[in-house]
Image: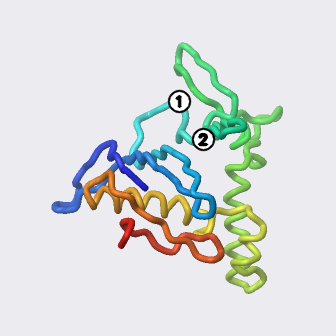
Amino acid sequence: SFPALPASVVSLVPGRPCEDSITLLTQWRDVATGSLGTAVYTASWVSPKSDAHTQQHMHYVGHAGELRVDQAHRGYSGATDAGGYGSYNPLYMRYVPDARGRFAGQAGYGYVSIEHFVVAAAGVNDGTLSLSDIEAEGQLALASTTLPVTAILEAGRTSLDAGGHVPVTIHYSDTALPESVAVAGR
């Protein structure tokens, strides 16, 4: 079930309310075993200036352990009188020139991810790569890899539209991809 809690609602288009952020308190049920799990999801499209461009983190607690992932900070932070507190991501790109004063950021994953996209697009355009090839490489975010999160957000939106605290079901295909989202029992 998806009791959805909007963090804030703005209406930029008259008659069409939309959130700039949404928080979902969810209860998951394993269809095979009936066991329950709880998760909290927050997505925001408008963020104030912060210590990192995006706050990407996950904390999982299970009956036999836990896992913490902090993608935004990658373990580096610092503060200066001039710049204040900041989280540094040295793997995104190199922010200082090399010993000869030249740009040296092209080996970071920021530039490499753009390169992967350009190479994939060229390969699809010239027929040397298919979507299946790109999906198998696992280098780029594709609709199939972002669809599960999109379905969770859509379930929250569906719950809000039905008055909130309304159970919503995500229906999955045989390949474990979300196919539809509906108020439970409909």
Picture coordinates of residue 24 (x, y %)? Answer: 42, 48
Q: Is residue 116 left or right of residue 45?
A: right
Q: Quadrant of the N terminus?
A: bottom left
Picture coordinates of residue 42 (x, y %)? Answer: 45, 45
Residue that carries the numbered disc 2 in the rendered image:
58
Q: Residue 51 shows which numbered tag?
A: 1
**Residue at the top extreme, as displayed:** 81
Q: Residue 98 shows which numbered tag?
A: none
Q: Secondary structure at mark 2?
A: strand
Q: Is residue 111 left or right of residue 45?
A: right
Picture coordinates of residue 163 (x, y %)? Answer: 25, 56
Instruction: Give the answer, above or below, for where 11 lies relative to 138.
Output: above
The residue drawn where x is 48% and y is 44% is: 40
**Residue at the left extreme, as displayed:** 14
The residue drawn where x is 73% and y is 55% is: 112
Picture coordinates of residue 131 (x, y %)? Answer: 69, 78
Q: Amino acid at mark 2?
A: Met
